[in-house]
Image: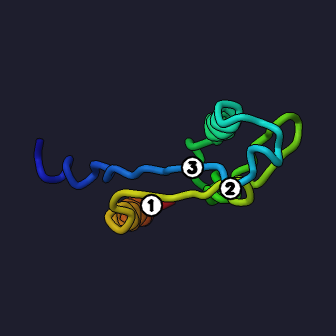
Amino acid sequence: MDADAHDNDLPEIGIEVDPKAGILSKLGIDEAEFEAAVMAAYDALDVADPDAVPPIEDVEVEIRGRKHRLGDIADIEITGDVVELDELLDRLEGQDEHDHDHNGA
């Protein structure tokens, strides 16, 4: 693989979402139902439009017909090289602006 293609590889980032202490009993659900609700919320995100994706803690999770803010019901930990991801996204955004300027749009 050439160096330019490697520069666009996304660094590995993980998101760990665990129910906050006592939230499962408060909501009257088990861990499997919690996980299914979080995955359904994730699947519903329109990742094709980054501007439409809220911060992870603001994602709405529906549990038994009620919507909850993920940050209110879960402890969220992002792992991996977040700094490298931010730098890559900044570079890509700069390329998009450069391409936009040179295309006369």
**Quarter occupied by residue 92:** bottom left
* Type of amino acid at the residue the image marks with label 1: His
The one of 3 and 17 positioned closer to us in this rendering: 17
* Type of amino acid at the residue the image marks with label 3: Val
Q: How many marks?
A: 3
In the picture of the structure, the residue carrying the numbered disc 1 is 100
Q: Residue at x 13, y 52 (%)?
A: 3
In the rendered view, does 48 fall on the left or right side of 73?
A: left
Could you tell me if residue 61 is visible in this image?
A: yes
The one of 67 and 8 positioned closer to us in this rendering: 67
Res 22 label: none
Q: Position of residue 98 (x, y in %)?
A: 38, 65
Q: Are marks 3 and 2 in contact (CB under 8 Å)?
A: no
In the picture as drawn, the residue positioned furthest to the right comes out as 65
Q: Position of residue 26 (x, y in %)?
A: 82, 48
Q: Give the number of the mark in front: 3 or 2.
A: 2
In the picture of the structure, the residue carrying the numbered disc 3 is 17
Q: Position of residue 33 (x, y in %)?
A: 70, 32
Q: Residue at x 61, y 58 (%)?
A: 75
Q: How far apart are the two marked residues, 1 and 2, measured between alpha carbons?
A: 48 Å
Vertical relation: 36 (above or below) 14: above
Secondary structure category for the residue under label 2: loop
Q: Give the number of the mark in front: 3 or 1.
A: 3
Could you tell me if residue 102 is visible in this image?
A: no
Vertical relation: 55 (above or below) 63: below
Q: Residue at x 40, y 66 (%)?
A: 86
In the picture of the structure, the residue carrying the numbered disc 2 is 21
Q: Are marks 1 and 2 in contact (CB under 8 Å)?
A: no
